[in-house]
Amino acid sequence: MILEFRLMKKIVLINFFVCLLFILCSCDRQIPKERNSASQIMDKELEIGTYLFNADEMDSIEISGEDLLNHKKVNISTVEDGRDIELVIKRAEYGPAIDMDAYFRKIGGDKIGIDLVTYLKKSTDEWFGALEDFYYQLSCYDFDNDGEKEIIVAAGNKKDILELYILRLDHNNPDFSSAQILKSINSGSKAYVNEKKELCVIDFQGQISTYSLNDQ
């Protein structure tokens, strides 16, 4: 009789724990777990791209400060309405400064260039030299669909410093006197262009600020 009672007690306890485990598993499936902010930021980075500035159909180059200090360079060429545009980022031939050059020329014609590194303040040293843990980017992108690409110069550490300038240049005579700054950004970590062609800036906490080029 005592053995039968103990056996029944074990069966009741086993059934209780099985039911409890089933309930806990069901709740775990039904209640979505909150994802931490780091995971959300990682997803956002994958969604918007890995560059400082990200946009579909852009022409772009980016290089790390470490590579620049090791005398590496990047360049890209694209054609727009019979005009060749070349972007180059490299160490200057002499001294510690870096060059962030945009060259324009008609196909088969003379090349005219402008160095855009002087727009950067927080992302270079006092001689406009590269900082080892920073990144430097030049891009061409047509924000207003007028067939002429704006030039984007960007630099930052992809953490809490982003300097970004959207420039409209006279492609026939590019110089600082005729350069028009359409938008300047000095905050955040990275930026991207949304479906409305607005500039979206994301900070290290995953917060997004949206800007139109028409904003004053």
Image (cartoon, rainbow, N blue to C red):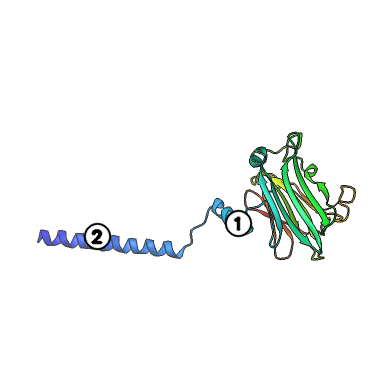
Give neighbour class at mark 1: few <14, some 14-19, many 20+ (Cα, 10 Å).
Answer: some
Q: Is residue 64 left or right of residue 177?
A: left
Name the spot of residue 40 as percent of width and height, x first.
Answer: 57, 55
Q: Which residue is mark 2?
A: 13
**Residue 142 visible within the image:** no
Name the residue type under label 2. Answer: Leu
Q: Which mark is residue 44?
A: 1
Work out whether residue 56 or residue 48 is closer to the camera in this orientation and state it: 56
Residue that extends furthest to the front in the rendered view of this protein:
108
Q: Say which quarter of the image contains residue 156.
A: top right
Give neighbour class at mark 2: few <14, some 14-19, many 20+ (Cα, 10 Å).
Answer: few
Q: Quadrant of the C terminus?
A: bottom right
Q: Can you say whether 202 is above or below 99 in the image? A: below
Q: Residue at x 79, y 62 (%)?
A: 80
Q: Can you say whether 34 is above or below 134 in the image? A: below
Name the residue type under label 1. Answer: Lys
Name the spot of residue 166 as percent of width and height, x first.
Answer: 78, 53
**Residue 191 visible within the image:** yes
Secondary structure beneath label 2: helix
Q: Quadrant of the N terminus?
A: bottom left
Q: How many marks?
A: 2
Q: Earlier in the sequence, mark 1 or mark 2?
A: 2
Q: Are marks 1 and 2 in contact (CB under 8 Å)?
A: no
Q: Nearer the viewer, mark 1 or mark 2?
A: 1
Secondary structure beneath label 1: helix
What is the distance, in whole Å, between disc 1 and disc 2 at their CAs?
Answer: 47 Å
Work out whether residue 165 or residue 43 is closer to the camera in this orientation and state it: 165
Q: Residue at x 65, y 38 (%)?
A: 70
Name the spot of residue 164 as percent of width and height, x first.
Answer: 75, 49
Q: Is residue 30 left or right of residue 131?
A: left
Q: Can you say whether 40 is above or below 130 in the image? A: below
Q: Residue at x 72, y 43 (%)?
A: 90
